[in-house]
């Protein structure tokens, strides 16, 4: 006797913009968190956010419910994404006495806290809904708009995790005003990622305001459109492939080598900084394999440099890059599936990167030292033709860039 069970899971979640979310006059958080008389809630906040907004957050809950929530304050750095922190959240959920379906966990903070809270929510009673309010730029445009949750394990980034999207995510751009400049740059890396892969107009917008976006904390004329285009582009890629059944993903640009770079350089590099180094190296790979033109390659490197993001790090030797590629290949089920740009806003996937390719890309970046014009004579003179390499068309078949069909969050 044998039985075959088939089932499908319908997933719907909402990402919406709302400013001043901790103002009691704004009912957005109260609505998505279901606050009211007798509400029992576990509110997870990262320490930096608690220092800046803790009083306002507590006042908001006091205004909207007659029951005092259970607050748990966590460290916001990558080293805190551990099983110990995960169990700390589950114990707090027990203390809070939250119901399985009607009492969503509320996560307020950067990507570390929202990742942790999401994983805990997915495991607690085999699934308890949660609501998230990202307070960093990288959270607004990347970490808090998808379905993935995770903790780090055994020296590997995000090795243990689940697919469990928040029922609701509120994006509040005004929270960026208190963010350090370095963390603005950290989030810009993920915006540049989407721009290089599929949105040339977004790339131009970031180019136009690169300096002001950092110094004015996204209080610029184009900032709302930049965030909207970035989130829309991300959701366009995620929605049809939420469970990653298809492992060729444009959103993996900058995420082939960066996991090992980030963990090996920890705690020195932020996630977006490691992604920036990966993007620079990936553009060099694309250039050296004849996929990306010389001027377009330098254009990406210049933008990373202008925003203050790194393109190199001392840990990035050939052995580490090879390890990163091998690890990514295992993560992609034995295929490299490396997304590389073929132009600004266009990309392909490459399957045959060799150690020699890695060496040539390293040499290209070694020759690049940005000055006023973002180049040096050494970098200026390096072209695939000069190196006698096989034209790109004979090695890789580019795929068309994804169409931009606006999806209202």
Image: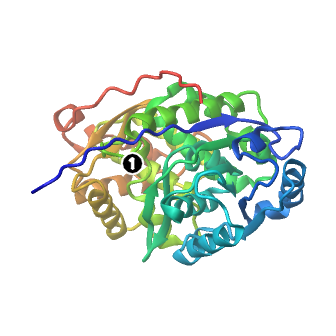
Q: Nearer the viewer, residue 174 or 360?
A: 174
User: Percent position (x, y) of residue 137?
Assistant: 66, 47
Quadrant location of residue 317?
A: bottom left
Quadrant housing residue 231:
top right
Left or right: 103 in relation to 23: left
Going 33% across and 40% down the picture, which residue do you hit? 383
Q: Nearer the viewer, residue 183 or 151?
A: 151
x, y (%) of residue 219? 79, 36
Image quarter where the C terminus lies is top right
Residue 380 position by quadrant: top left
Q: Which residue is mark 1?
A: 282
Whether residue 399 is situated above or below residue 264 in the rendered picture: above
- The structure's colour scheme is rainbow
Depth check: give the residue in front, 250 or 65: 65
Determine whether 15 is above or below 183 in the image.
Answer: above
Q: Residue furthest left?
A: 1
On the image, the x and y values in percent for residue 198 come to 45, 31
The residue at 28%/47% (across/down) is: 337
Q: Is residue 267 visible?
A: no
Within 10 angstroms of label 1, few (less than 14), some, or many (20 or more) residues?
many
Give percent across and percent down for residue 89.
62, 70
**Image quarter in which the N terminus is found:** bottom left
The reply to whether residue 42 is visible in this rendering is: yes
Per the image, label 1 sits on a secondary structure element best described as: helix
Q: Residue at 61% x, 45% y: name it.
A: 188
């Amino acid at each position: 006797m044998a039985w075959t069970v088939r089932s499908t899971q319908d997933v719907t979640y909402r990402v919406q913009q709302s400013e001043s979310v901790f103002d009691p006059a704004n009912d957005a958080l109260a609505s998505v968190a279901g606050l009211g008389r007798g509400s029992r809630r576990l509110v997870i906040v990262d320490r930096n956010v608690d220092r800046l907004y803790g009083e306002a957050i507590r006042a908001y809950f006091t205004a909207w419910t007659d029951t005092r929530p259970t607050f748990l304050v966590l460290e916001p750095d990558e080293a805190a994404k551990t099983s110990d922190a995960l169990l700390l959240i589950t114990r707090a959920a027990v203390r809070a006495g939250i119901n399985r379906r009607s009492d969503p966990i509320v996560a307020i903070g950067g990507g570390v806290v929202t990742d942790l809270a999401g994983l805990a929510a997915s495991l607690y009673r085999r699934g308890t809904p949660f609501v998230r309010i990202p307070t960093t730029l990288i959270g607004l445009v990347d970490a808090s708009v998808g379905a993935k949750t995770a903790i780090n394990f055994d020296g590997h980034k995000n090795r243990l995790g689940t697919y469990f999207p928040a029922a609701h995510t509120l994006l509040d751009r005004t929270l960026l005003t208190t963010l350090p400049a370095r963390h603005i740059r950290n989030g810009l890396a993920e915006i540049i990622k989407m721009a290089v892969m599929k949105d040339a107009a977004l790339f131009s917008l970031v180019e136009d305001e690169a300096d002001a976006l950092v110094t004015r904390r996204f209080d610029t004329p184009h900032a709302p459109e930049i965030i909207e285009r970035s989130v829309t582009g991300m959701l366009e890629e995620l929605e049809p492939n939420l469970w990653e059944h298809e492992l060729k993903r444009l959103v993996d640009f900058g995420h082939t080598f960066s996991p090992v770079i980030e963990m090996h350089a920890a705690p020195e590099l932020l996630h977006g900084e490691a992604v920036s180094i990966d993007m620079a190296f990936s553009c060099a790979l694309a250039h050296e394999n004849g996929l990306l033109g010389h001027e377009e390659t330098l254009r990406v490197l210049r933008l990373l440099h202008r925003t203050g993001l790194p393109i190199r790090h001392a840990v990035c030797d050939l052995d580490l890059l090879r390890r990163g590629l091998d690890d990514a290949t295992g993560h992609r089920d034995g295929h490299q599936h490396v997304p590389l740009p073929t132009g600004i806003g266009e990309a392909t996937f490459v399957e045959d990167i060799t150690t020699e390719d890695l060496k040539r890309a390293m040499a290209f970046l070694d020759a690049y030292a940005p000055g006023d014009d973002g180049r040096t004579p050494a970098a200026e003179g390096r072209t695939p033709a000069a190196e006698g390499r096989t034209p790109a068309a004979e090695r890789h078949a580019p795929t068309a860039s994804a169409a931009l069909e606006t999806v209202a969050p």
